[in-house]
Image (cartoon, grey):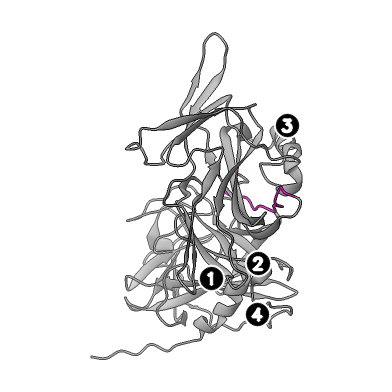
Amino acid sequence: MKTFRIILITLLTSFAVGVQAQKKDAIVLAKSSGYVMPRTLLQVDTNSQEETMRWPGTNNEWIKDSCWAESVPVAEHIERFFPNTLFDTELMTLLANSPDVKTSFEDYVPLGWVLAEEEKETVLHCYLRMPSDVLTHLWVASEEACLVDRVTGTQYRIRRTEPECTRKHLCMKAPKGEVLDLRVFFPPLPDTVDDVTIFGVPVWRLVGNNVKLKHRAHGVFNAYDTIPRLRQPRLLHEHLSENAPYDKQNWNTWRVYTDPHLIRPLDDYTMAAWLTPEATYLAMAVEQNWTTEYFGFEPGTMLLDEYGRQYHLREVQGLPLEQIFFMEGNAGDYFAFMLVFDPMPLDVGSFSYIEPDGEPFSAWGANWHGTTKDNLNVQTLRTNQSLFRYLPRQVVK
């Protein structure tokens, strides 16, 4: 939040995952909010027209070993596991045939995961839609992979992968478009474990990610919150220094606000949520680095829950939605934005917060790159409400 991000939502930015474990007696412990990545580094055989994709950017070039998987588990009935996502074949077909969609959805690779108890083991299912006829240099896991109990610090280390590719680059051939189910096996977790951190599975962005185990979570919120009352910023100047209509490319025309809801020092993007029947309120912590600093939001910002449902941004309390603006205060202030989204049902366990990329603009330090915060646990965010109490500024000279 230190620099402005213009918001322009597309389905390609992120998607939510509602997954069931594949085995009959499996118990789902956690579900991912997945993401997509571009289909890159393609080579086409001129004779057979067979496509080969080399998986990019896992930073394991120092490991020379690779393996060829003769068979790879396939995720059956994937549309049921990942409704309304790019894993959904019916949805992809509709999008591909839509005159309003300018992007080929085959150009993106969806990924998602689910953690489950299966046959006295803990299994991490890593889902990936096959982007080509042949896929090479895919990194699944090594001896670094583990689950860590966040209460006791106990480490549950990797046992094996399926197909077996531990500490090797995986190469495989499968029908293009088929969804693969790559698996990482760990020891069983005791019933007392309800909060873990996952390490060592970088392609699925599990490199120190905290995960609440759903069926073991304590203190479930089963009633709606009351509407939060945070202090709203006030307009200080209609324009920074030039009395002219708003122009994104001219910061002298941007509005200046001040007197936001001050809070205790928190890391940027620390969040708290309030669920009400009318709306979902999301407070977001901001660190002020300069006396006058600029920010901005667009209506395309949204939340995407584990079932694929979208919750669109309605307003940012006290601030404009479609304009860049300045916030004036003290360097060293910490304050909160309050974002208001569509109402969210109480059965949602986790969601993703999505700020997609936008168009560039002219300003010092301009940043229009989007941000995605995956797998935000609703219970944790509701517990965080106490972090956002108003804390008046105290200055010692």
Q: Which residue is mark 4?
A: 219
Which residue is denoted by mark 2 in the rendering?
Answer: 214
User: Which marked residue is nearer to the observer: mark 4 or mark 3?
Assistant: 4
Mark 3 or 1, closer to the camera: 3
- Image coords of residue 365 (percent x, y): 33, 56
Count of labels shown?
4
Q: Is the stretch drawn in magenta largely helix, strand or loop?
A: loop
| Residue to which mark 1 is pinned | 319
Is residue 37 shown in magenta?
no
Indicate the quadrant containing the N terminus: top left, top right, bottom left or bottom right.
Answer: bottom left
Amino acid type for the residue under numbered disc 2: Lys
Q: Residue at x 48, y 47 (%)?
A: 359
Residue shown at 51% from the left, 81% from the top = 388
| Disc 4 to disc 2, C-alpha distance | 11 Å
Residue 14, magenta (yes or no) = yes
Q: CA distance from mark 3 to mark 2?
A: 38 Å
Find out whether the residues at labels 3 and 1 contact each other: C-beta distance under 8 Å.
no
Quick check: 172 above or below 125?
above
Residue 364, located in which quarter of the rendered image? bottom left
